[in-house]
Image (cartoon, grey):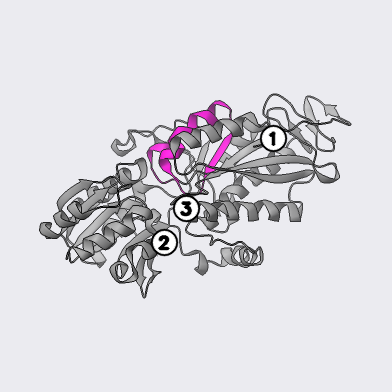
Amino acid sequence: MRNRSLLILTTAVTAGALTLTACGSRDDKGGAAENGDGGNVTVTIGLDAPLTGELSALGLGIKNSADLAVKTANKKAYVKGVTFKLESLDDQAQPSAGQQNATKFVADKTVLGVVGPLNSGVAEAMQKVFDDAKLAQVSPANTNPALSQGVKWASGDKKRGYKSYFRTATTDAIQGPFAAQYVFNEAKKTKAFIIDDKKTYGAGLAGTFKGEFEKLGGKVLGTEHINPDTKDFSAVATKVKTSGADVVYYGGEYPAAGPLAKQIKEAGAKVVVVGGDALFSPEYVKLAGATAAEGDFATSVGAPIESLASAKDFLADYKTGGYKEAYEAYGGYSYDSTWAIIEAVKKVVDGNGGKLPDDARAKVVEAVQGVSFEGVSGKVSFDEFGDTTNKQLTVYKVEGGAFKPVKSGTFGG
């Protein structure tokens, strides 16, 4: 991120607040402003995602969708006197890089909110940095429940650790059991082999699947942890075959899931492979091969975006925008995450007489908690933990070399 040096031509200060007609200004309390075109104040929205590396297909879809939201807000002049700018940083799906990016965003006083990250493990490394700075973070993709409800959430002892953290994706407390219900009750698979990649997301998701699957009467015939970077899964493939399982549940992401599924099938195991939202990508089918992937399942957050009337404009505008990469699984949620920050900024400005207050960051966090609007993915609002109130999920099945929706609903429904 480049450093900015500002030439302040005129500044109007009223009751400790920065007027939005100032040509340029900067304060030291997170109420940042920078002159934009036509004398507008520029508010930066940060974006953190894996923009390079194996998960870049998902990350670039997140970035493009956030970019579309920013451009839409500016085109509509949605917040009078404010021009929004997106600043994107690449975390390469690495917690250490995510933490460094968080520190960079905090240091830039024009940043009043951050969209991202993709990975729950990266989010763990970013949360405290943002919370200490009272900087709102809204993820379109994190699903690990502990991020918002604390490490003891499964026992019912739910405690929100960071008031600045929000997400538009539902959690694995719902996603894992939702998959288990479908696998056991509708796919009629009763003998599972469960594998995870030992990461925050994968291990947590596999655990919630296992608990519900066994509660329903399913048998877990084996469990295994893998190193997703090796790409040689022959040993675990043999274990799956000899176990007699009829379903493999994998807690992890598509770069490893595709080769894993391929090697399990090549070993002769008569199973379907099932996973969560990080498998829901055309990249999974490419990596596994269309033949091996056929019949496999993945759950993902929300309803199929293509079926939602609320997503009509997003789909059309994304196409018109000429983005080279697909919006992928989290595009609609990224747009909504970005728009939640935009709505919060609007609420803060409108509630302060058209001015951006000195403590804008803290005020934006408060405003995000109370946002409620019809987004691309449906109704967007947050509960007392900062989690989305939209608990819908969808099961997708690989048919004819592509994921197709087979059931949408909520856990237990």
Residue 210 in percent (x, y) is at 23, 49
Q: Which amino acid type corresponds to the residue marked 2 in the rendered image?
A: Glu
Q: Gap between marks 2 and 3, in whole Å?
A: 26 Å
Q: Which amino acid type corresponds to the residue marked 3 in the rendered image?
A: Asn
Q: Gap between marks 2 and 1, in whole Å?
A: 36 Å
Q: Secondary structure at mark 1?
A: loop
Residue 95 in percent (x, y) is at 44, 36
- Which marked residue is nearer to the observer: mark 2 or mark 3? 2
Q: In screen coordinates, is 31 left or right of 242?
A: right
Question: Could you tell me if the residues under marks 2 and 3 are in contact, i.e. CB atoms within 8 Å?
Answer: no
Q: Which residue is tagged 3?
A: 390
Q: Which residue is tagged 1?
A: 110
Q: Which amino acid type corresponds to the residue marked 1 in the rendered image?
A: Thr
Q: Which residue is tagged 2?
A: 283
Q: In screen coordinates, is 247 left or right of 120?
A: left
Q: Which residue is at 26% across, 67% downward? A: 186
Magenta region, residue range: 119-148
Q: Earlier in the sequence, mark 2 or mark 3?
A: 2
